[in-house]
Image (cartoon, grey):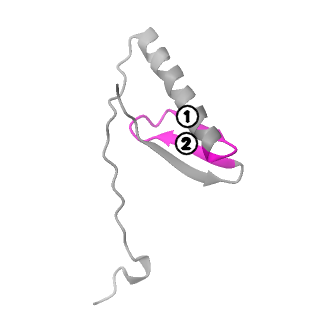
């Protein structure tokens, strides 16, 4: 079992989903649930395509961390 990290971005038509470790796996859905399902399907299809063509499947299991920054205070003396 390999875990991939999904990134979801709100867009005008709903959500865009993309895998961090495998950026070629990208899709859209009208809501987050549909986007998540579409991304899982796209991942399965991409794995199958890579296996059939003998290409190496990108490794998953990335660690993603959010780093907060107060943008309005960047560069100002404290």
Q: Residue at x 37, y 33 (%)?
A: 3
Choose between 19 and 35: the one closer to the eye: 35
User: How far apart are the two marked residues, 1 and 2, measured between alpha carbons?
Assistant: 6 Å
Any mark on residue 31, and which? none
Q: Position of residue 38 (x, y in %)?
A: 60, 33
Residue depicted at 29% across the width and 89% down the height: 77
Residue at 32 percent across and 37 percent down: it is: 61
Please state the horizontal and vertical placement of residue 30, each as a whole percent of the image: 70, 44
Question: In the rendered structure, does residue 24 fall within the stretch colored magenta?
Answer: yes
Q: Position of residue 75 (x, y in %)?
A: 33, 82
Q: Which residue is mark 1?
A: 39
Residues drawn in magenta: 14-32
How packed is label 1: few (under 14 Cα within 10 Å), some, or many (20 or more)? many
Judged from the image, the secondary structure of the residue bearing numbered disc 2 is strand
Q: Residue at x 49, y 33 (%)?
A: 24
Residue at label 2? 17
Measured from the top left, where is residue 60 in percent x and y?
34, 33
- Report if the CB atoms under discs 1 and 2 are less than 8 Å apart: yes
């Amino acid at each position: 079992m390999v875990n991939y990290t999904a990134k979801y971005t709100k867009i005008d038509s709903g959500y865009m989903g993309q895998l961090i470790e495998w950026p070629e796996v990208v899709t859209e859905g009208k809501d987050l649930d549909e986007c998540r399902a579409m991304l899982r399907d796209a991942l399965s299809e991409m794995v199958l395509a890579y296996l059939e063509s003998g290409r190496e499947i990108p490794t998953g299991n990335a660690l993603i961390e959010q780093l907060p920054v107060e943008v309005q205070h960047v560069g100002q003396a404290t």
